[in-house]
Image: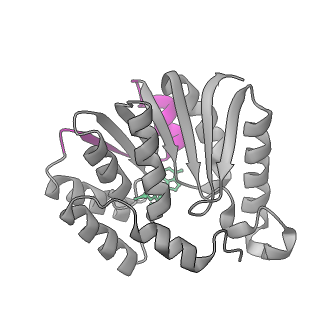
Amino acid sequence: MIQFINEEVQQYLISKMSLNSDKLEELRLKSEIDNVPIIHKDVENFLKLLIKMKSMNSVLEIGAAVGYSALMFSEVIPNGKITTIERYEKMFIKANENILNFDKKEQIEIIFGNATDVLKNEIKGKYDLVFIDAAKSHYREFFELSLEHLNEGGIIVSDNVLFKGRIVNDKYVERRNKTITRNMRNYLEFINQSPYFSTILPIGDGLSITMIEEK
Ligand SMILES: C[S@@+](CC[C@H](N)C(=O)[O-])C[C@H]1O[C@@H](n2cnc3c(N)ncnc32)[C@H](O)[C@@H]1O
């Protein structure tokens, strides 16, 4: 697989990035040891910058896992609203425990279920940022369903869009990943041809950022 940024440079940059609360840093470490796929540190830092630059106050996240990124958002916007969706029961239970343990029950709403159904039927409010970090084959669906849940000037950020370089060249694509790769390529084509401006950054596993404003 492709390494987007030289490993030594990457480690250097990460070592200069701001830390979260000690408790959240412990959860990052634990998640990494347990192989829970949480956001990369450089993606985390970029999201923090975006939230601060745009004075965002609410985040809708698709894909909670153990709640790490939702808790990170809650530290960046202590008075803001965070809603996160998780369909895997084991992760949902773990995320709930972590949210309780961090005393963030009031601030973070976690909804159990398939994001497609939840976005259609349960999400009522509007958000400044939608963060898509779930089943890669469904990004377009998540994107389209999220549009009506965005405040004016809102932004949709999608993680893992370069799929460890598979997107770039078929020589990296194993048979079992062919469909996901095709769907992700279609997603990138879709956002680039949409009326909204998007860019893709080679950080983490590839991050797309789409401004929901006419180009
Ligand atoms: C990469 S992890 C999320 C990591 C989390 N955002 C973080 O950085 O701490 C992806 C999660 O999305 C969940 N997921 C995948 N497809 C989903 C769907 N259709 N609806 C809801 N959750 C989904 C998976 O069960 C998994 O826990």
Q: Where is residue 103 in the image (x, y as percent from the top left)?
A: 13, 50
Question: Left or right: where does residue 123 sit relative to residue 213?
Answer: left
Q: Is residue 66 magenta?
A: no
Is residue 87 something that shows in the picture? Answer: no
Question: For residue 126, which quarter of the picture?
Answer: top left
User: Which range is magenta?
Assistant: 105-125
Residue 7 figure quarter: bottom right
186 in relation to 5, above or below: above
Q: Which residue is drawn at 23% across and 59% down?
A: 98
Q: Nearer the viewer, residue 23 or 68?
A: 23
Point 56% across, 63% down: residue: 204
Taking depth in this image into account, of 13 and 60 the one nearest to the observer is 13
Compared with residue 145, is residue 183 higher up or lower down, i.e. above or below? below
Image spot of residue 125 (x, y percent): 39, 24
On screen, residue 87 versus residue 102, left or right, reads right
| Left or right: residue 207 compared with residue 66 | right
Q: In which quarter of the image is the C terminus?
A: top right
Q: Quadrant of residue 41?
A: bottom left
Q: Quadrant of the N terminus?
A: bottom right
- Residue at 79% x, 75% y is 172
Q: Is residue 123 visible?
A: yes
From the viewer's perspective, tell me whether residue 199 is left or right of residue 64.
right
Question: As displayed, is residue 92 above or below residue 140?
Answer: below
The image position of residue 119, as x and y in percent, is: 49, 34
Q: What residue is at 58 percent from the left and 47 percent from the top?
A: 158
* Magenta highlight on residue 122: yes
Report x, y in % for residue 67. 33, 56
Q: Which of 16 and 150 is in front in this view?
A: 16
* Tag count: 0
